[in-house]
Image (cartoon, rainbow, N blue to C red):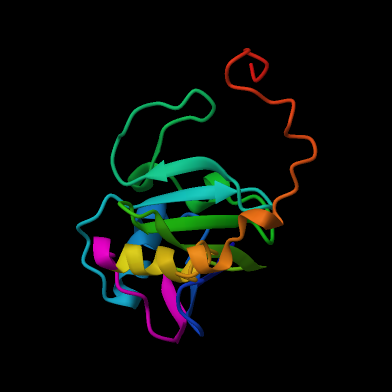
Amino acid sequence: MIYKIVFSCDEVDGFRRSFEADSDATFLELHQAILKSVNFPDDQMTSFYMCNDRWEKEQEVTLIEMGSNFEYDNMIMESTRLSDLIEELGQRMIYIYDPMYERYFFGSVAEILPGSLSTINCVENRGEAPKQLQTEDAAEAARAKDSAWEDDDMFADSQFDIDDLDADGFQDLSWDDGSMF
């Protein structure tokens, strides 16, 4: 069988990589194909996670032996075939390429075709890849951008008026008599 696996990234608009891989190919071979398609060096402790339909992580496939998990077996990329974990069309996975900030590509099995392949082929290479590693400054900027507390004046004294508070319901609270706890 041949799996067509499509990866996208929510950090970069238009990013998409599609691979055709034989079901007997290993996760290590898929890892190497992904790195080659985005020009990332192979110097990070990357992982694959098989996911459920809500993108919740389930089985992890690590680059090297890590330790065991109570819920799942310890699986290594080099010895785990795609067919060991891919069970159906639409199977979801994530590929963590920046383990420090847990940034990843979302993957999904788009097609299952008859046949076989000797190597994994990148059949679609669209869009610029994000930077592989995020710096602390970039992470802080991303958090600030996504934060609902972006407005510096949100809690400024100019917007707060003590008279706007309704005292009803608060008169019974006292720090002295222990009624709070």
Q: Is residue 178 left or right of residue 9?
A: right
Q: Quadrant of the N terminus?
A: bottom right
Q: Position of residue 94 (x, y in %)?
A: 50, 56
Which residues fall within the magenta stretch?
A: 120-137
Residue placed at 44% from the left, 51% from the top?
A: 48
Magenta stretch contains residue 131 = yes
Magenta stretch contains residue 135 = yes
Depth check: 65 or 21 in front? 65
| Residue 4 visible to the viewer | no
When asked about the image quadrant of residue 160, the answer is bottom right
Depicted 30 relative to depicted 69: above or below: below
Q: Position of residue 152 (x, y in %)?
A: 45, 69
Residue placed at 52% from the left, 30% from the top?
A: 72
Name of the residue lying farthest toward the top? 177
Q: Quadrant of the C terminus?
A: top right
| Residue 160 visible to the viewer | yes
Residue placed at 57% from the left, 67% from the top?
A: 159
Number of numbered callouts drawn = 0
Q: Position of residue 8 (x, y in %)?
A: 51, 72
When asked about the image quadrant of residue 180, the answer is top right
Name of the residue lying farthest toward the front? 163
Depth check: 32 or 1 in front? 32
Q: Is residue 167 left or right of residue 126?
A: right
Q: Position of residue 36 (x, y in %)?
A: 30, 73
Depth check: 159 or 109 in front? 159
Depicted 73 relative to depicted 115: above or below: above
Depth check: 144 or 107 in front? 144
Residue placed at 33% from the left, 76% from the top?
A: 38
